[in-house]
Image (spheres, helix red, strand yellow):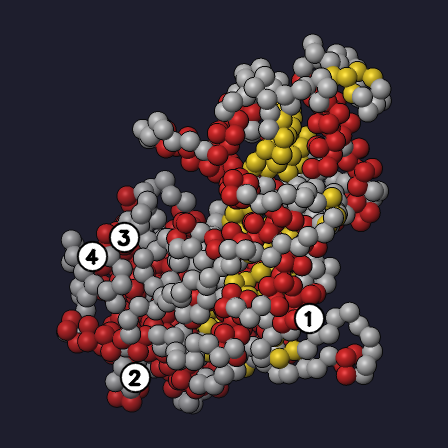
Amino acid sequence: MSPAISPEATHADPRLPFLGELERRALWLSTWMIHNANHIRPNHDGMKVGGHQASSASMATILTALYFAALRPEDRVAVKPHAGPVFHALQYLAGRQTREKMENFRGFGGVQSYPSRTKDTDDVDFSTGSVGLGVAQTLFGSLVQDYVRAHGWGLDKPEGRMVALVGDAEMDEGNIFEALMEGWKHGLRRTWWIIDYNRQSLDAVIREGLYSRFEEIFRSFGWDVVVLKYGCLMDAAFAEPGGESLRRWIDTAPNQLYAALTFQGGAAWRKRLNQDLANEPDALALVARRDDDELAALMGNLGGHDMVNLLKAFEAADNDRPTVFIAYTVKGYGLPLAGHKDNHSGLLTPAQTELFREKVGVRAGHEWEPFEGAQMPEADLRRFIEHSPFFSAGPRRYSAPKLPVPADFPCPRQPSLSTQAGFGLILNELGKQETPLAERIVTTSPDVTVSTNLGGWVNRRGLFAKQEMRDLFKSERIPSTFNWDFSTKGQHMELGIAEMNLFLLLSALGLSDRLFGERLIPIGTLYDPFICRGLDALNYACYQDARFIIGSTPSGVTLAPEGGAHQSINTPLIGMAQDGLLTFEPAFVDELSVIMGHAFDYVQRDGKEGGSVYLRLSTRSLAQPQREMSPALKHGIIEGAYWLREPGPNADLIVAVTGAPTPEAIEAVGLMAEDRRDIGLLAVTSYDRLNAGWSAAQRARESGDREARSHIEDLLDGLPPHCRLVTVVDGHPATLGWLGAVHGHRTRALGIERFGQTGTVADLYRHYGIDAEGIVAAAGALSPEKPIRSRGYGHRIGRGTPFHA
């Protein structure tokens, strides 16, 4: 357990006895949670449970100091993944978590292994999980707080600090350093990162000298660096004769040696120190004055486990500067496995747990009592918790009113247009309006603002910065299409080229209503192939239920001259599979207008009724249909599909197409119309929504609701059993290949399964068989007994006739 705090320190700060007691209780409860989970659910991954046990112990002092002394209600915290149990234990002590969920740790419906905004009921600010992301999320959360306040919103609430508790091995994650650069560029402030420097990762001990490099990196980006290496027992020992010699030994001891001696205990410390300090009589006397338990307590009294020095450090950092605390700790501190290099996979045995129970004074059957075995009166402890600044306030999750979305959404009318260009024109029209919606839109892009058609919006609304910067080209009267000034009122946050930063910023922007009580409508743009570069952060953002809109372009191989590196194959499947993200792929700009109007409402809906939206757009300019947007058409577009050509009653062929290849599908249907008079053409605007609706209807019927129906079932309901389906997508063919399973129709799914190459769109569509000829060939092969007379190509497609030589 915690080393003794000197009477002088206790007298100086009356909080220390309470904090020491709460730390002991949190360490016991988190240890018991893990033991209980492993006992009743023995099939769990021991490595993961063990990682929780060791890491929670190393963070117990830091978390206790934060939540019961340093934090204020306006502060927001990302807890490192494996410190989840001690976080939940502290919430339980504060009355914000239930015993039922604590007992069910790692079980269905219990507290989550890694704290989750959406799954846990206690006070989680930022979800954690994939290491490194929660760390960077606090940085972008701070930038969003600055954005909100710079626009004059949320000033009735105190300004908070964004805090991340960081595992030292997390610092290997590249996204952290990508975020550091953006923080420097945007003038990061009010951010704390507290690194749990226990010098152990899952597989190894941290390399010697690495953290001095990290100190240099942080300082170069303008951060204050606070190294918490020594506790107050060490400080006192260093003041004794021989203390400087002991300090030198501690400073030069290899990480592995220090960890091994910590595990072995006081006798091992004595033997090694007597050996290494043999020529230092004062240092030998310092060691000799302490028995084995006292010596082990001294050598384990690192800064991250010392409440006195932690409080001093946190209270001294009372400024706006970004600060990193490098807190030296022992992994598994206070437990029998402390310091052992295998403790990430280790768990206390039942016998060790019983000994630990006796040590903390917990009676059998009373393990879950919050203050069982406490050395202070329970009423005093509860009173201390109630008056702790962080827990003295009410709920910390805000909400914000919905912004009205215009019923008549802007819709550019041009004979020929791409959806990417239409997207930019729609935003430009919104930018002309002085409405609450337009005011709360904030756009961002990873160095592709112009090439994703955000230029017009930025011209109107400006770029955000905390200090005004005038466009030099403009002031020097140099002609430029883009006149971009930076100011505190700008509504575009420009990023460098890292897609991880894009999705982490969108995540922070999309949580603004719940973190700061001010709603924003974030819109991010990027190249569609590079969604995969930020996919981990995108998944993390959706897991947190952050709300935003992605405009991703160009879809598929439509950027044909750039070659395979700039062509996307699997992004439609990502859009379908990603929870919390609704995907659309319109072909025409009037469809896009309807979808964007829906998206602005959808991202504001509560709970599972809403989510984020992904628009898979194209640079390919298509001839636009001249039509009125009827209610029925609008409904079909939002639900995911509508008939461009409705099939007749005896249809034996349907073509379903999404996005950019729509002209090829229209042409192919025209070519086949003589032989397939009842042929139908289905325009799919959201394969994601169609598939989700069909799956939901099946689950409902399986649960007893026999009347449940989905939109795609209704659309395909009248097709005769012998009807064939050809599906076409500029992406992986599995995107639409499932349509045949809706009513059991034989289907040929066309799409792209290999990396593309340079050429024109026509070249590549022909190569992959998603041009008009390829669609006709696929249709002919589905029913070879009934050949198709292709008037456009002067021969029949039928049995044994390959379309491509």
Horizontal and vertical percent for residue 535? Answer: 58, 52
Q: Are marks 3 and 1 in contact (CB under 8 Å)?
A: no
**Residue type pointed to by label 4:** Glu
Answer above or below: position of 576 versus 128.
Answer: above
Q: Is residue 567 left or right of residue 9?
A: right
Number of other residues with Cα within 10 Å of mark 3, as a class: few under 14, some 14 to 19, many 20 or more: some
Horizontal and vertical percent for residue 670? Answer: 73, 27
Would you name the residue on which mark 2 appears?
Answer: 6
- Of the residues tagged 1 and 2, which is closer to the observer? 1
**Residue type pointed to by label 1:** Asn
Q: Distance between the Cα atoms at labels 3 and 1?
A: 52 Å
Residue at 52% over, 82% down:
321
Would you name the residue on which mark 3 appears?
Answer: 101
Would you name the residue on which mark 1 appears?
Answer: 459
Kindly tell me whether residue 652 is visible in this rendering: yes
**Residue type pointed to by label 3:** Lys
Q: Is residue 472 left or right of residue 371?
A: right
Number of other residues with Cα within 10 Å of mark 2, as a class: few under 14, some 14 to 19, many 20 or more: few
Q: Quadrant where the C terminus lies?
A: top right
Number of marks in the rendered image: 4
Q: Earlier in the sequence, mark 2 or mark 3?
A: 2
**Residue type pointed to by label 2:** Ser
